[in-house]
Amino acid sequence: MLVRIALVLAAIAVSGAHSLDSSTHVIKEAFAAPLGWRIDSLPDPDHVLDLRVGLRQSNWPELERQLSETSDPDHPRYGQHLSKEAIEDLISPTADSLEAVLDWLKDYGVMGDSLSFSPARDWVRVKLPLHVVEEMLGTTYHVWRHDEGRYAIRTTEYSLPKDLHAHVDLVQPTTHFGGISALKSSLFREFTPLEGGAKAEVDSIAADEIDASCNETITVDCLAQLYNFADYTPSFPNNSVAVTGYLEEFPNATDLQIFYADQVPKAAGSSFTFVDIPGNNQTSGEDDQHGVEANLDVQFAFGISYPINASFLYTHGRPPAQLPDGEENFNEPYADFLDYILAQDTIPWVISTSYAEGEQSVPFSYAERVCRGFAQLGARGVTVLFSSGDGGVGGPSEGCTRFRPLFPPSCPYVTAVGGTVNIPEVAVDFSGGGFSDYFARPSWQDDVVPAYIEKVSETYDSYFNKSGRGIPDISAQADNYRVFYQGKAGHVGGTSASAPAVGGILALVNDVRLAKGLPTLGFLNPLLYKQNVGSLFNDITEGNNPACGTDGFNATEGWDPVTGFGTPNFALLRELN
Ligand SMILES: *[C@@H]1O[C@H](CO)[C@@H](O)[C@H](O)[C@H]1NC(C)=O
Ligand SMILES: *[C@@H]1O[C@H](CO)[C@@H](O)[C@H](O)[C@H]1NC(C)=O
Ligand SMILES: *[C@@H]1O[C@H](CO)[C@@H](O)[C@H](O)[C@H]1NC(C)=O
Ligand SMILES: *[C@@H]1O[C@H](CO)[C@@H](O)[C@H](O)[C@H]1NC(C)=O
Ligand SMILES: *[C@@H]1O[C@H](CO)[C@@H](O)[C@H](O)[C@H]1NC(C)=O
Ligand SMILES: *[C@@H]1O[C@H](CO)[C@@H](O)[C@H](O)[C@H]1NC(C)=O
Ligand SMILES: *[C@@H]1O[C@H](CO)[C@@H](O)[C@H](O)[C@H]1NC(C)=O
């Protein structure tokens, strides 16, 4: 964990004491402000920034190579997950890089206790007044205002001394404006309270038919029938599952109990661990909200996986807001989350996240670094799931010329979960999918993705990159979930629902595996894309995901950029060795 250390103001109040000639500064990154952001004013030069410098990870290709072995079911090393220490050894920067960065910081009077490091020393963090940062980065920050009223102190370009370029991957906050949002479909399907507290009508489970009510309302029982886990009770003691929370939204424990009484009576009285992850702004608590997103995630992930140890991993901080009157609340949520979680000795084996933002609004350097953080989790045996998005292929209906996939689902090291609806299941029309513009198609997609692309209408050629990572990997029901919020039942949808549902189911799969002495699933994608494993999912062949003034892509036989391989069949997945 990054330890926050008090500012040594005296040490940094130097000016002109540094030896570097600023004429050696060369642009490190330029990134146009994402849509909706405009310059508002000049910030207070004494405003304090919590600067993070990402040092080059010395042996990343080697970590990637090892992960490709431990995640490939046909490789002798399959499942031999790497230890925290082994990963840190591979990614820690070289002594040269460390020295170069520390020398540079020292030139501005920054040293010793004012610095904090990640365990692998691949991040260094320091709080500095804006005017010092501007000098260090040869840039000018502005207060930017988003059309929706958010503020952020950012720049669209920064420089570093030429000699430092090879040692530093990125410096933030600079060009990352940060716009993550929850993928609950309040965007699409308003939370509509039903008659409060009424019991869901669930008939006894028939082997070959699903309750008719499941076509209108999804409960834990419906998912158990659809995905074949009704007869399974987890029993392995050390198994674990988690959902993450951001943006000051917490689950309500009382609602969880009402949900359990309604849908998972055996779980009544059970709870989860609330893990408090320090973010950039440790809020006081008075603004904390109990929200639909967090309730949905917790109720379904933990309802499905009960009694597996469940955690809610909450990262503090909110999107940039409430400037210029107060302290900035800039938000680098995944970086804060990863700092914390990668420093832990034990990590939940499945982590599901229902938050994302447009790939185009994230600078590549930041996306790449965060994606590598998720790869490290995978290498340690953790399965990382993200909702694929609720906007189809992405992009506005008017004047759109390019699809807009979401990040982090576009990161190849996470498993992106799309959405379905109805019985029998078809793709839900908002299911996020398509192809990354940042991440190249990983080799494990080579057997299935190019075959799909060949059949795509040529009219889409300019809308996406045919060499990009295909999204999503799998899917699950994504609408009409019966969720409790402030004591009332309501229907909630979105791929926000499908990711935690899959998270609960994969925790059950891990349970079977751990009990058999097999390793946890870890980074799942190479396994998923093995032809025979893809067939352990219910193939979704109907529906499409329109956006950007197009009909989006078509769901088809096999993998498609709407539902991936389809929805999980636990009865088959549990047989994997
Ligand atoms: C469960 O975890 C604890 C602590 O990490 C460990 O000591 C114990 O051996 C584990 N039990 C099993 C059955 O793996
Ligand atoms: C976090 O932000 C809120 C709202 O701007 C502010 O009131 C609070 O003091 C901040 N907390 C910390 C620890 O910086
Ligand atoms: C469950 O996991 C949390 C961490 O997420 C841990 O603090 C707690 O001790 C675990 N509980 C059990 C019973 O293993
Ligand atoms: C479920 O609803 C869909 C859409 O309304 C309909 O097409 C389908 O036939 C229904 N399925 C069943 C089993 O009634
Ligand atoms: C398409 O993606 C590949 C792999 O990421 C990249 O090398 C190439 O530059 C991209 N092409 C375009 C036109 O963006
Ligand atoms: C989807 O299917 C329809 C009907 O078969 C076809 O006209 C359309 O071109 C397909 N879309 C793409 C992107 O290939
Ligand atoms: C939590 O839910 C209960 C009802 O289940 C409600 O009475 C309470 O107000 C909620 N708390 C918050 C902070 O929303």
Image (tube, rainbow, N blue to C red):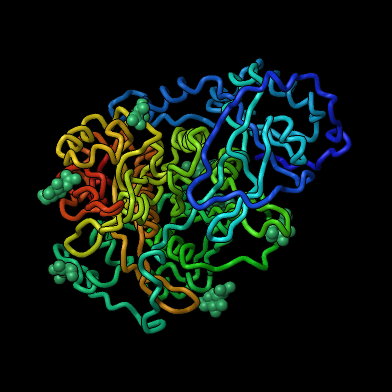
Find residue 17 and report its image quarter.
top right
Q: How many marks?
A: 0
Residue 43, position as x, y percentages in the image: 72, 48
Residue 309, position as x, y percentages in the image: 48, 54
Q: Residue at x 32, y 55 (%)?
A: 398
Asked whether residue 380 appears in the rendered view, the answer is no
Q: Residue at x 42, y 49 (%)?
A: 236
Q: Nearer the viewer, residue 333 or 270?
A: 333
Q: Quadrant of ligand 2?
A: bottom right
Q: Quadrant of the N terminus?
A: top right
* Residue 70 higher or lower than 297, as above or below: above
Asked whether residue 392 appears in the rendered view, the answer is yes
Q: Quadrant of the C terminus?
A: top left
Residue 48, position as x, y percentages in the image: 75, 45
Residue 353 shown left or right of residue 84 in the figure? left
* Residue 330 higher or lower than 137, as above or below: below
Outermost residue to the right: 10
Q: Residue at x 14, y 62 (%)?
A: 208
Q: Residue at x 26, y 36 (%)?
A: 529
Q: Nearer the viewer, residue 181 or 196?
A: 181
Residue 294 shown left or right of residue 175 in the figure? left
Residue 203, position as x, y percentages in the image: 23, 75
* Residue 80 higher or lower than 334, as above or below: above
Q: Nearer the viewer, residue 368 or 381?
A: 368
